[in-house]
Image (cartoon, helix red, strand yellow):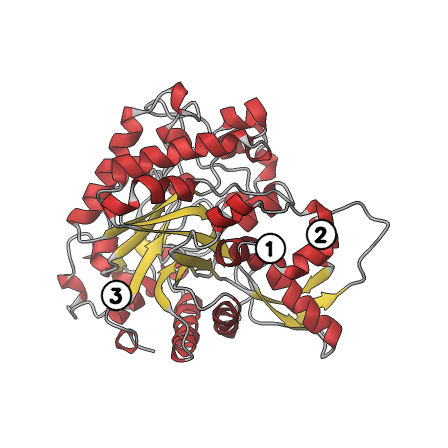
Amino acid sequence: VKCSSFPKDFIFGATTSAYQIEGAWNVDGKGRSIWDYMTLHEPDSIADGSNGCIALDHYNRFKVNVLSYLTFHRTRFSISWPRILPGGRLCGGVSKEGIKYYNDLIDALLEEGIEPCATLFHWDVPQCLEDQYGGFLDHQIVEHFCEFAEICFWEFGDRVKRWITLNEPWSFSYCGYVGGRFPPRRVDIYRKHYKKHQGDTIGMTNVSTWFYPLRNTPKDAEAASRAVDFMLGWFVAPVITGDYPPSMRENAGERLPIFKPDEVKLVRGSCDFLGINYYTTYYAKNVPKSTSSPPHYDNDRHVENRTHRNGVPIGPRGGSMWLYIVPEGIFHLMLHIKEKYNNPEIFITENGVDEVNDKTITISKARVDEIRIKYHRDHLAFLKKAMEHGVRVKGYFIWSFLDNFEWTQGYNVRFGIFYVDFENGRLTRFPKSSAVWWMNFLNKPKSPWNKLPWKLQDVKTEEEHQSPVKRLRCDNV
């Protein structure tokens, strides 16, 4: 697959999120998020006991941006709610420093020719709202999130032309609550007060695994379909159809909220596009629904996820236990969305693979990531195939541009196309083989390695002498 295989207006970009890269957790009046609180008070909840207090120190280092040298012309970043509203709500005051930081970041991106795409919520609920009323378990958060969203639209909407309201509400709900429900009102504010004047687009990013039936039986086929409904359909169906999938209604029963007519009017058609995060595919095995167990999301879906069939893995495994590489899954997922949800405009807002952070190998060796090159190449090929079948895919964002703090896995795995040295105290960045592959894929003008821009300098050490890929070094990023 080649870049020229895609339409000229197809967007290629890279994705980050605030807590995973910014650091500066208590700087310039920033309030605490639930991730600040958990990682500092419950370090055992993170695999390596680490946190994002420093992360990549992006708060202080954003101006030197390697994206410009990769010719990624789009980047998706998230805006930290407690950095804008330290008290979680408007009456607690707006941080001028937080506003300035994101204004400076957006301006710096635009100066480099990079179009910013902003995510409003990437899981960093202000801890004060969690303490006061339980965060997303209380409807009060609708009003306070609306206040945060409106400030962002007002302050940044003249330059940010593509907005994402929520990142992976399934992940936040399932991992944080198992059964939480997200409010929909923030889109209404945007449409009423800002879209007409700013002409921007707004959507929601959803994560979904694809599922194959474990066995060639009707029950497992139904289980595979039900698994997708309970993961993707839970959040996509309401904004397309105005209601939850029938399989959820059937299996969750009266515990699933009924949309009122005004709510249907509010949510149906509320997204200009769908953001889809795809990483992996599993097998689905039907399990009998238990009548004796207490109500629970997993009992409602009555599906058992499997990664192996007859002892054979569904695909090669990445660095994380959950990530199996199945490129054709993205093709089937795209066709499913086209056929079930009236072929909406789609952006792949995250796609990537990780490797284990092996501290016993040299940085030079760690930077040779052929698995990531193959991962992106194969997924792009299947994405192109889906487009040839009529799926309206408009863009593809990689996860991630840089190695970063990976939530409960801490720094144990690396998703970036740039290696970050977390051990030397300077957070030095080094391009991996995949970064070079992306430069070539995106038709960066061919130059001798020693003629690259100054931030991608040729460093000829004994250890790195054998390969031009390994000789690329990126300091001061």
Quote the CA–CA distance across marks 1 and 2. Answer: 10 Å
Upstream in the sequence, badge 2 or badge 3?
Answer: 2
Which residue is tagged 2? Answer: 252
Q: Quadrant of the N terminus?
A: bottom left
- Mark 2–mark 3 Cα distance, whole angstroms, equals 48 Å
The quarter of the picture where residue 352 lies is bottom left
Residue 269: percent from left, percent from top = 44, 55
Q: Is residue 475 visible?
A: no
- Residue positioned most to the right: 292
Residue at image position (28%, 31%) is 99
Residue highlighted by disc 3? 439
Q: Secondary structure at mark 1?
A: loop
Q: 257 and 399: which one is in front? A: 257
Tell me where residue 450 appears, x and y as whole percent: 15, 62
Residue 73 left/right relative to 49: left
Q: Quadrant of residue 8?
A: bottom left
Q: Residues within 10 Å of mark 1 (few under 14, many from 20)?
A: many
- Give the residue number, with chain letter if any, for mark 1: 244
Instruction: Tell me if label 1 and label 2 are in contact, CB under 8 Å.
Output: yes
Q: Amino acid at mark 1?
A: Tyr
- Give the mark toward the camera: 2 or 3: 2
Left or right: 57 as drawn, with respect to 140: left
Element assignment for label 2: helix
Give above or below for 111 relative to 100.
below
Farthest-out residue, left: 451
Residue 137 shown left or right of residue 141 in the figure: right
State the SS at label 3: helix
Viewer-side residue, 365 vs 369: 369
Direction top: furthest residue: 92
Instruction: Name the amino acid type tagged 2.
Output: Ala
Q: Residue at coordinates 71% horizontally, 58% vertically from top-left?
A: 250
